Amino acid sequence: MLVVGGGNAGCTAAIAAARLGARVRLVERYGFLGGTATAAMVGPWMTYHAGSADEAGRVTGGLAQEFVDRLVEMGGSPGHLPDASDYVPTITPFDPEMHKWLLMAMCEEAGVQLLLHATLLDVLLDGTRLTGVRVQTVSGPRTMMASRVIDCTADALVSHAAGVPCEQGNADGRVQPMTMMFRLSHVDLDVTAAWLRDHPDQIRTSLDPVQFSATTLTAVAGLWDLWRAARAAGEVDIPREIVSFFRGAHPDEVSVNMTRVTGLDPLDADDLTRAEVEGRRQTMALLSFFRTRVPGFAQCRLAATPAQIGVRESRRIVGEYQLTSDDLLQARRFPDAVARSGYPIDIHSPTGEGTRTTRLPKGMTYEIPYRCLVPLRVDGLLVAGRCISVSHEALASTRLTPTIMTLGQAAATAAVQSLAARVEPRAVATDALRASLITQGVDLRRPEPACA
Ligand SMILES: Cc1cc2nc3c(=O)[nH]c(=O)nc-3n(C[C@H](O)[C@H](O)[C@H](O)COP(=O)(O)OP(=O)(O)OC[C@H]3O[C@@H](n4cnc5c(N)ncnc54)[C@H](O)[C@@H]3O)c2cc1C
């Protein structure tokens, strides 16, 4: 079995398949694993919960939870923390450097055969059946044959090359903006918290201002007056309406999610180049903003910038089922559900300022059917991660990391079962698939009734 793309979906898929006994190869273009979570330093993960931050509200288990448990053991994550910005029940900060190693270690433990610095070139087909891929490596092109391929490239690169119908963006073809995240260290969050206690109207939170501290302020969203003043003075030129940062894996470090690059196509080489340059220009302007205007940040340092800008949205496959915003908002149930989430539909404007959040009824979760992982037209292939079969609106929720990890585990389990049963992935018996996922700890409970 071959997994293409070593992000969180791909690693989860490779580890899960290997643990189930498959001989698995994982191909990744970078020299490390983790994809958007490490190469683009995107975090914190959100959210493992819906409705409440306790066991009753947990929606994600399996390998996705195992990653967190192991990171906590390694000192690479404080675990699930209540979200001070009141957006979701919990957020899960992690150290991208530790996560890079954890994924490699877990792949090795499971017996996954890694091929790094290997970039997909094209695919091999026998009629409509995918039989392998060709990759470019440091030692030249290499052909890799496989009985099953799982496309975890986030851009549906394997699927597109194999002739699977694909879509991109909203009705106008526009995608959500790209964002270069960065980390600031040497931050004194006690000072920030003290200032916020005096300016409680400058933060979105349900915490009582007397509770504000470096520990409780896990996420900060607001600081509107400081931001407006910087913009009015011409210090920053970024189409973002709010200051937004998260506590990092370490107490003096924050992860900033504020740059915004709109109107460019992440699958166009020239656009992507422009986006990287613009992301760095905005990063430097924000560093100056934080140092000069935000209490607690006067001595901060630019601890890390990512290897690549974060891409929220690109190409998606069209599969046996396409999940829609209605499915999410109605908390629709599916007999072949393989993952669930309560994360809102969170659309950063594709054209400029503004972020539109549409929430499910409180505490409700939606389900993702297995058919969203099964592409039309091509056999021998499954898809996991960002590029599964969903609408532009649904992607604005399904793209979140705990969900895409679960999708990796689901695709792997289905691939293994399809080989054992000698059927194509689209013919997998989904009752057995769900049963295996539940045995592996994936949380497929249905505690609340679906909406009427
Ligand atoms: C700015 C931003 C903010 C976000 N905020 C959050 C958040 O707060 N919380 C959260 O949980 N999620 C968030 N997300 C979403 C989440 O990070 C991603 O959707 C998720 O990580 C995607 O995982 P993936 O495995 O599908 O793709 P990726 O992690 O992108 O993995 C794809 C892998 O494929 C590899 N690859 C690509 N092309 C090739 C090729 N040609 N050959 C070989 N390998 C290839 C890549 O190098 C990469 O390793 C955010 C995303 C962005 C961009």
Image: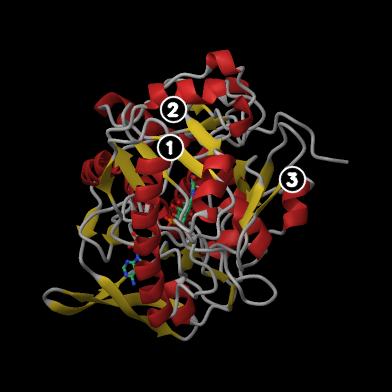
Looking at the image, is 212 positioned above or below residue 1? above
Tell me the residue that label 1 is attached to: 294
Q: Is residue 3 visible?
A: no
Asked if the residues shown at circle 2 and circle 1 are in contact, with their CB atoms under 8 angstroms apart, the answer is: yes
Classify residue 399 as left or right of residue 305. right
Q: Residues within 10 Å of mark 1 (few under 14, many from 20)?
A: some
The amino acid at mark 1 is Val
Q: Residue placed farthest to the front in the image? A: 233
> Which x, y percent locates residue 397?
61, 51
Asked if the residues shown at circle 3 and circle 1 are in contact, with their CB atoms under 8 angstroms apart, the answer is: no
> Which x, y percent locates residue 418?
48, 58
The amino acid at mark 3 is Arg
Q: CA distance from mark 3 to mark 2?
A: 44 Å
Q: In the picture, residue 370 is in which quadrant? A: bottom right
**Residue shown at the point (55%, 21%) measured from the top left:** 198
Indicate the secondary structure of the residue bearing disc 2: helix
Q: Is residue 150 visible?
A: yes
Q: Residue placed farthest to the top in the image? A: 210
Quadrant where the C terminus sits is top right
**Residue shown at the point (46%, 40%) measured from the top left:** 245
Quadrant where the N terminus sits is bottom left
Asked if the residues shown at circle 3 and circle 2 are in contact, with their CB atoms under 8 angstroms apart, the answer is: no
